[in-house]
Amino acid sequence: MPQPEGQPKYNDLIDIIIQSSQKTIDVLQKDGSVTKEQIIDDDTIWWKTGSVNSNAFGRFAFLLKELERMALECVNYMHKDRALQMAHIIMEIGLSYRRSIDAKSSESQRNAQNSQSTLIDKINKNKVERVYTMKDQMNKSLLSGFLGRDREKDEEND
């Protein structure tokens, strides 16, 4: 679907990320009533935009969030001063893990068989780089592979 002139193609992606990252909260009004409002969950956006190529990433996300939740629970199980110290230590550990995820998300990998672009690469190039090898083309017609017809189809779809 062609985009209107002057409108970047990645707006659709941003809209999808924002809409899927909203959460509903209860807001107490001045008169004592409660209304529901939708807000953007910053944490969800951060997790969605991380680009870590690992089948263990989802489990790691769960464990990190549970570790950070324990920081909030400290005040229920120990003296307030000690609980605040412990909570601060736990949150700093969580921050270190988050920075390591950011660093991993910033890596781009390219080799003969595969490529993994970063989020910034994807926005700047507005496409994911594809690597074509003759092995991929051998399953198809030899002439089509040499002429690069599949590559041309992908370029038209972008």
Image (cartoon, helix red, strand yellow):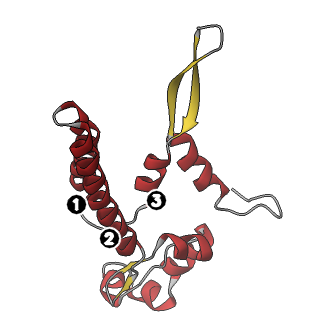
Task: Look at mark 1 in the image and give the residue it sits on.
Answer: 55
Residue 19, quarter of picture = top right
Instruction: Residue type at mark 1: give it.
Output: Asn
SS at circle 1: loop
The reply to whether callout 1 and callout 2 are in contact (CB within 8 Å) is: no
The residue located at (49%, 69%) in the rendering is 119
Q: Residue 80: in sight, yes or no?
A: yes
User: Between residues 59 and 140, which one lies in front from this camera angle?
Assistant: 59
- Residue 85 on image: x %, y %: 26, 50
Instruction: Residue type at mark 2: give it.
Output: Ser
Which image quadrant: the C terminus? bottom right
User: Between residues 43 and 109, which one lies in front from this camera angle?
Assistant: 43
Residue 117, quarter of picture = bottom left
User: Between residues 64 and 16, which one lies in front from this camera angle?
Assistant: 64
Left or right of residue 139: residue 9: right
Q: Earlier in the sequence, mark 3 or mark 2?
A: 3
- Residues packed near mark 2 inside 10 Å, few (<14), some (14 to 19) or many (20 plus): few
Task: Look at mark 2 in the image and give the residue it sits on.
Answer: 100
- Residue 114 on image: x %, y %: 34, 81
Task: Look at mark 3 in the image and give the residue it sits on.
Answer: 49
Is residue 89 shown above or below 106?
Answer: above
SS at circle 2: helix
Residue at the extreme left: 77
- Residue 6 on image: x %, y %: 82, 64
Instruction: Residue type at mark 3: give it.
Output: Thr
Q: Residue 66: in sight, yes or no?
A: no
Is residue 133 shown above or below 18?
Answer: below
Question: Which of the two marks, 3 or 1, is nearer to us in this view?
Answer: 3
